[in-house]
Image (cartoon, helix red, strand yellow):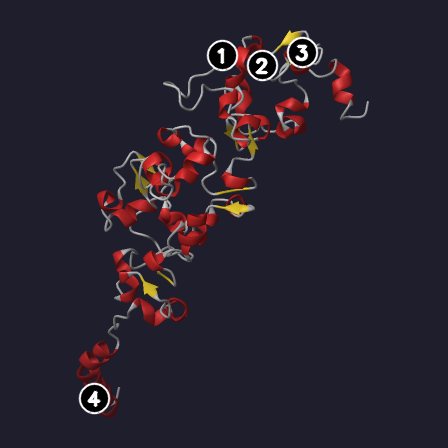
C-alpha cells in the first residue's frame, strides 16, 4: 500500500469517528402517541359528544397495553374486570341482590361504547335503544303502551345495573306503581271493583310495559278478571277477607269449566289434572301465555318433566313446536297422553 493510500484510509477513519455521535443521535426513535398511527380511529370517535376519559385525554394505556396482538389491541384485563378497576362495583350497585344480566355476564360493552358515544353515560344508543339490543322491541310496542314507558323510557321504573328489587325495579312493586296510580282515587277503586288491590302485585293481572288488551291486562286474561267480576271467585269486596276464595282448588274451577269437556273422552288423566291442581299449570288471573298458562312454551312441561329438559343435538321438530303437538294436556285415551295411537301419530306429520 502506498503512502497516499494510507493517508486516505486514515482520513476516512477520522471522519467516521468524528461523525459517530451525530449518526447515532439521528437514528434515535422518537416516541409517538397512539393517535399518531390510529388516525382513522381518532377521526371516527373524537367528534362524538361524550368521550371516555382515556380517549379524551389520549391515555389509551389506561385500558390497553402499549403493544397488542395484531390485529387486535390487547386489553389489560378481561371483561368487566377492566371497567371495575376504575368504576368501583359498589358505586354501580353491584353489591345488590339482583344484577343486570349483561353486567353479570361480564359484558359492559353490550350497553356502553368504551370509547365514545352520542348518548350520555357512553350508552351505545339513546334511551331505550340500548335496552332493545337484548330485549325484543316488539314486546314494548303493542297496541296499549304504558304511558310512563312511552314518555320516560325504561329508567322510569328500572335501575340499569343492579337493584335490591326483582326485575331491577327502582322501588318495591306496589310502592312504585302507587307513585303514579293512587289507590285512594275513586277511578282506581272503580276499575278494581272496590277490591283493596294496593297490597297485591299489579303484575299479576297487568303487563307493566305494553299489551293488546285495554288497561294493560295481560294477553290472556281470565274472563272474570277481564270483566271486573272478581266476586265470581272471591268473597265480596267489602267483606272481612275480600280475597278469600269461594271454594278450594278444582271445586272452584269446575263451577265454570266442565270437567267432562276438558277430558274430551280421555280416560288416562294428566297427574295435576287428576289431582285437581289447575293452578299448577294455569294462572287464575292473567298470563302472558295463551290459555292462562303459567309458563312459556315447553318450560311449563319441563318444570315437572325435568328429564326432558336436557339439550339434544337433533331435536324433534314436534318437540320444538310444543309438547302438546303429540300429548294432550288434560286427558287422553292413549298411554303417555298421546293424542293418537302410535304409528298414526307419526304419520300425521311424516308420510309412511
- The residue under label 4 is 11
Report the disc number at residue 331.
Answer: none
Q: Which residue is mark 2?
A: 255
Check disc 3 and report the residue beneath it. Answer: 260
| C-beta proximity under 8 Å, tags 4 and 2 | no
Of pointers 2 and 1, the one earlier in the residue sequence: 1
Mark closer to the chain start, 3 or 1: 1
Q: Which of marks 2 and 4 precedes in the sequence? A: 4
The answer to whether the residue labelled 3 contacts the one labelled 4, judged by CB atoms less than 8 Å apart, is: no
Q: Is residue 134 left or right of residue 118?
A: right
Depicted 176 relative to depicted 236: above or below: below
The kind of secondary structure element at disc 2 is: loop
> Is disc 2 in contact with disc 1, using a CB cutoff of under 8 Å?
yes
Q: CA distance from mark 1 to mark 4?
A: 118 Å
Q: Is residue 311 visible?
A: no
Q: Secondary structure at mark 4?
A: helix
Disc 4 from disc 2: Cα separation = 119 Å
**Label 4 packing within 10 angstroms: few (<14), some (14-19), many (20+):** few
Q: Residue 82 vs residue 181: left or right?
A: left
Closer to the observer: label 3 or label 1? Answer: 1
Q: Which residue is drawn at the image coordinates 64% and 23% (left, top)?
A: 324
Q: In whole angstroms, how far apart are the C-alphas of marks 3 and 4?
A: 119 Å
The residue drawn where x is 38% and y is 37% is 167
Q: Position of residue 297 (x, y in %)?
A: 57, 28
Amino acid at each position: 500500500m502506498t503512502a497516499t493510500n494510507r493517508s486516505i484510509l486514515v482520513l476516512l477513519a477520522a471522519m467516521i469517528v468524528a461523525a459517530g455521535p451525530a449518526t447515532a443521535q439521528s437514528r434515535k426513535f422518537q416516541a409517538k402517541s397512539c393517535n399518531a398511527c390510529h388516525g382513522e380511529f381518532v377521526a371516527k370517535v373524537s367528534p362524538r359528544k361524550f368521550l371516555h376519559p382515556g380517549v379524551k385525554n389520549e391515555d389509551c394505556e389506561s385500558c390497553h397495553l402499549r403493544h397488542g396482538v395484531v390485529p387486535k389491541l390487547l386489553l389489560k384485563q378481561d371483561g368487566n374486570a377492566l371497567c371495575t378497576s376504575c368504576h368501583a362495583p359498589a358505586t354501580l350497585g353491584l353489591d345488590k341482590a339482583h344484577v343486570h344480566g349483561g353486567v353479570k355476564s361480564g359484558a359492559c360493552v353490550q350497553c356502553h361504547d368504551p370509547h365514545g358515544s352520542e348518548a350520555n353515560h357512553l350508552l351505545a344508543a339513546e334511551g331505550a335503544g340500548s335496552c332493545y339490543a337484548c330485549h325484543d322491541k316488539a314486546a314494548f310496542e303493542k297496541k296499549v303502551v304504558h304511558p310512563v314507558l312511552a314518555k320516560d323510557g325504561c329508567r322510569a321504573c328500572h335501575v340499569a345495573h343492579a337493584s335490591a328489587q326483582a326485575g331491577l325495579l327502582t322501588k318495591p312493586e306496589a310502592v312504585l306503581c302507587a307513585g303514579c296510580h293512587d289507590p285512594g282515587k275513586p277511578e282506581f277503586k272503580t276499575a278494581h271493583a272496590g277490591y283493596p288491590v294496593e297490597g297485591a302485585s299489579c303484575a299479576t293481572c297487568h303487563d307493566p310495559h305494553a299489551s293488546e288488551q285495554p288497561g294493560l291486562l295481560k294477553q290472556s286474561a281470565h274472563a272474570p278478571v277481564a270483566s271486573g267480576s272478581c266476586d265470581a271467585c272471591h268473597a265480596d269486596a267489602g267483606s272481612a277477607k275480600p280475597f278469600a276464595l269461594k271454594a278450594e282448588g278444582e271445586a272452584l274451577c269446575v263451577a265454570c269449566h266442565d270437567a267432562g269437556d276438558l277430558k274430551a273422552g280421555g280416560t288416562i288423566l294428566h297427574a295435576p289434572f287428576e289431582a285437581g291442581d289447575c293452578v299448577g299449570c294455569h294462572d287464575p288471573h292473567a298470563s302472558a301465555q295463551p290459555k292462562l298458562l303459567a309458563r312459556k312454551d315447553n318450560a311449563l312441561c319441563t318444570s315437572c318433566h325435568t328429564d326432558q329438559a336436557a339439550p339434544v343435538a337433533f331435536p324433534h321438530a314436534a318437540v320444538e313446536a310444543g309438547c302438546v303437538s303429540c300429548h294432550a294436556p288434560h286427558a287422553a285415551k292413549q298411554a303417555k297422553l298421546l293424542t293418537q295411537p302410535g304409528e298414526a301419530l307419526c304419520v300425521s306429520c311424516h308420510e309412511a
